[in-house]
Amino acid sequence: MKNNSSLLGKIKLIIALVLVLGLVIGTNVMDNTSFDIINKSVTTIYEDRLIAHDLLYKISKEIHEKQLLLVTEDTESHQKKNQQMNGTIKSLITQYEETTLTNKEVEYFDDLKKNIEELMNLETQFYQGKVTSEKEGLEEQQQAVFKKLSGTLDNLTSLQLDEGQKQVVYAMRAYQNSDLLAKMEIGALILIGLIIQVFIFYTPFRK
């Protein structure tokens, strides 16, 4: 009878330990999932939103300087400066391509690259032009492209803000879920503690 009681006690203890182990493993998996979501969101906000936003700002700045350069007197120094800005813009475009883009961003980004290519072609014709009337016509075309570029850059910048806000929402949800899980874990541990006490100390068949 004593052996049976000892065996029953061991079984109860094993069941209690399994319950605790199951709870620890389950909550650990859920915590890791929430942590991964938060980590991914924070990384995305920095690498694909803040950096991308900064690149767009720099591209916009270069485009604005090119537009100002267009209305000044045409000289070789201006042409050389414009070529340097083109090199900077191409480098910024390459860096932007390395960020993660949504489908909508890809659409606007393709428009941006096409508009920049069109602008550079017009600039080449402008600096090679000899006739004043021809240069004036090319200048008007460039101004039209500048307007399209401004709109496209605005759209891309707005998308960065929208996507950044989405990532913040994802991170906050994951944090709230993790916080709720932690509270549930404490409650479950208390409940299991009570169950363990019942298993160990309550023996209804003892005589």
Image (cartoon, rainbow, N blue to C red):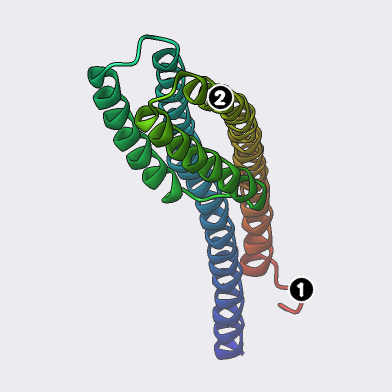
Comparing 117 with 25, the one in front is: 117
Comparing 163 with 13, the one in front is: 163
Q: Is residue 33 above or below residue 125?
A: below
Measure the alpha-carbon separation of dots 2 and 1: 101 Å
Percent x, y of residue 104: 67, 47
* Residue reaching furthest to the front: 131
Percent x, y of residue 49: 51, 37
Q: Nearer the viewer, mark 2 or mark 1?
A: 2
In the rendered structure, which amino acid carries the disc numbered 1?
A: Pro
Comparing 126 with 1, the one in front is: 126
On residue 137, the disc is 2
- Locate the C terminus and report the quarter of the image it occupies: bottom right
Residue 205 location, quadrant? bottom right
Percent x, y of residue 179: 62, 40
Residue 66 location, quadrant? top left
Give the mark, 2 or 1, whose residue is nearer the N terminus: 2
Looking at the image, residue 56 sits to the left or right of residue 80; the answer is: right
Instruction: Name the residue carrying label 1.
Output: 204
* Residue reaching furthest to the top: 72
Q: Is residue 18 above or below residue 79?
A: below
Give the class, few, some or many, for how many residues have Cα within 10 Å of label 2's Cα (few <14, many ≥20): few
Give the class, few, some or many, for how many residues have Cα within 10 Å of label 1's Cα (few <14, many ≥20): few
Comparing 12 with 87, the one in front is: 87
In the rendered structure, which amino acid carries the disc numbered 2?
A: Gly
Q: Indicate the secondary structure of the residue bearing disc 2.
A: helix
Residue shown at 52%/59% (left/top)? 28
Residue shown at 57%/64% (left/top)? 20
- Locate the N terminus and report the quarter of the image it occupies: bottom right
Q: Is residue 93 above or below residue 14?
A: above
Percent x, y of residue 123: 42, 31
